[in-house]
Image: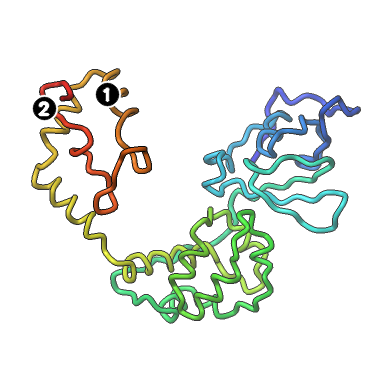
Amino acid sequence: MAEQSRKSGSINPEKPKDMVPIYIMGKRYFVPKTLTIMKAIEYAGYQLKRGAGCRAGFCGACGTVYRTPDSYKIKVGLACQTVVEPEMYIAQLPFYPAVKKTYNIEEMEPTAEAVLGIYPEVARCVACNTCTKVCPQELEVMDYIQETLHGNLDKVADLSFDCVMCGLCVSRCPAEIQHPFVAILVRRLYNHHLVPRSQQLAKRVKEVEEGKYDAEIKWLKSLPLEKLKKLYSTRPREGDPGVELKDNKIDWNDEVKFDYSGTNR
């Protein structure tokens, strides 16, 4: 949510060069045409107390709805990503009411019935597709709700992977489905019950617990900062010329040899 600070000046009566008019809290302001909605709000003299979040399109805290004179449609976007348009009327929705249920993944089965037991409103989906149309991430929201009903949890996990939890889909749904929370539940069920356990990870955890890397870690911690930075920047990486993968990973010890006395050999 935005609060106007003391530095907010009077509303400009004429359009300055390279500026566009927008409406914030119903008032008209001129802002640079290259700004995002979030930066434009701050440029106009408001302080964002809520709905700022990561400022990089990941947290979903800055869900925004707006209208422009060229269309009767409500448009949506993330304030940190969407560039201002002339004469746009802006309303931020930093949080849309949705209740996250509690459950125990260990005790649940990876089935549609289990999901419906927690979020029964999913069965009310009428396939109107308004959730998809309003999604600022351009996700196929309706599709993953339908796949949930059919028990295809792997498809749901894939289709909903880039959800940022902005809640705009919830605001438009006539069935009052809480799409982001449904997606989180499905991804948790899928990852916990259906995705094969990584044998490579289990092996590495065991090696760490047995102290296999203790000497190497101690040596790295003893290095001066500049040498540590150089070592990091020149480390072998997947895809580098001459770096061969072994069992789908880089064998660090084969690529960089240590004598643990403080120098490479």
Question: Could you tell whether 20 is left or right of 139 in the image?
Answer: right
Is disc 2 placed on a helix, strand or loop?
loop
- Percent across and percent down for residue 206 are 14, 52
Q: Which residue is drawn at 59% across and 43% down?
A: 51
Work out whether residue 185 or residue 215 is closer to the camera in this orientation and state it: 215
Of residues 121 and 261, the one nearer the viewer is 261
What is the C-alpha distance between the residues marked 2 and 1? 15 Å
In the rendered image, residue 189, in percent from the top left (x then y), is placed at 37, 69
Question: Which residue occupies 65% across, 62% down?
Answer: 171
Residue at horizontal 10 percent and vertical 33 percent from the top: 215
Q: Classify residue 27 by image quadrant.
A: top right
Using residue 251 as the reference point, say whether residue 72 is left or right of it. Answer: right
In the picture, which quadrant includes the N terminus? top right
Q: Circle 1 sits in a helix, a strand or a loop, which is it?
A: helix
Callout 1 crowding tier (Cα within 10 Å): few <14, some 14–19, many ≥20: few
| Residue 228 badge | 1
The disc placed on residue 259 is 2
Q: Depth-wise, is mark 2 or mark 1 nearer the camera?
A: 2
| Residue found at x 52% / y 64% | 159
